[in-house]
Image (tube, rainbow, N blue to C red):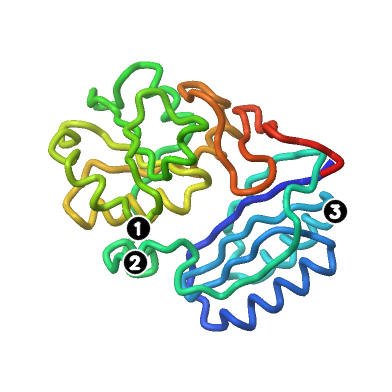
Amino acid sequence: MIANTAAYHFVPVADAGALAATLLERAQAHELRGTILVAEEGINLFLAGDRGGIDAFYAALKADARFAAMRVKYSYSHMQPFARLKAKVKAEIISFRRDDGQPLDYPRAPSVAPATLQRWLRQGHDDDGRRVVMLDTRNAQEFEHGTFAGALTLPIARFTDLPAALEPHRADLADATVVSFCTGGIRCEKAALWMRNDGMDNVLQLEGGILGYFEEVGGDGYDGRCFVFDERVALDPQLRPLVDDAAA
């Protein structure tokens, strides 16, 4: 079986170019494929390979104190979902282009754990009795494969479109607890931070994103699959791929 991983971590990186080169070399040594993104704000990884190679790669990475606390999310497939391995240095590990949505410049927005969110969705409100609105920060291509039941989805093509698309809904969200979510946590972390800095103090982020929710509590309250940016196309709540052709 192939171990598929998704991980990100916001932390200052002064040596982005050198770090990208080092991680590329390590991943090559362990015959991994996928994408390594490095920026001054941190790293974002989508890597797949045999479990031994994956474990060795992340053990070496977490030996660096900057990344010791990084969470790695796992799923498995028969196929290798990436055609090649690449590493890039970027301005942001996820492009948002908002000064008020940069995790290194502000305290992290509050989060809600999957088990707590599951309970809120089952009871129909949060622990203070407020209605819960799930805010999907992904684009239309992604949420067409699935999203939380009743979630607010926005007609965006890219993450940078989110602020303008959200504007018409802000008044309607004032009396709710808004839970920002995305695939693995990176976009909803920036989105929740920006929203709180922009005056929405009723916003939380889903810890670990949809993949973290699937890992911890399954698909309770979620309709469909979670789109992923590789040849598996999407994962169901048991983290099984929509496409898993071992010959691919």
Residue pictured at 58% horizontal, 57% vertical:
70
Q: Secondary structure at mark 1?
A: helix
Q: Type of residue at label 3?
A: Gly
Mark 1, Cα crowd under 10 Å, few <14 / some 14-19 / many 20+, is some
Picture quarter with the N terminus = top right
Q: Quadrant of residue 248?
A: top right
Mark 2, Cα crowd under 10 Å, few <14 / some 14-19 / many 20+, is few
Residue pictured at 27% horizontal, 64% vertical:
100
* Label of residue 97 in the image: 2
**In x, y percent, where is residue 18?**
64, 83
Instruction: Choose the circle earlier in sequence order: 2 or 1.
Output: 2
Q: Could you tell me if the residues under marks 1 and 3 are in contact, i.e. CB atoms within 8 Å?
A: no
**In x, y percent, where is residue 4?**
72, 47
Q: Secondary structure at mark 2?
A: loop
Q: Quadrant of residue 238?
A: top right
Instruction: Choose the circle earlier in sequence order: 1 or 3.
Output: 3
**In x, y percent, where is residue 82?**
73, 53
Which marked residue is nearer to the observer: mark 2 or mark 3? Answer: 2
Residue pictured at 35% horizontal, 58% vertical:
160
Q: Residue furthest left?
A: 171
* Residue position for label 1: 160
* Residue position for label 3: 52
Which marked residue is nearer to the observer: mark 1 or mark 3? Answer: 1
Instruction: Choose the circle earlier in sequence order: 2 or 3.
Output: 3
Mark 1–mark 3 distance (CA, rounded to whole Å): 37 Å
Position of residue 9 in the picture relative to residue 236 (left or right): left
Mark 2–mark 3 distance (CA, rounded to whole Å): 37 Å
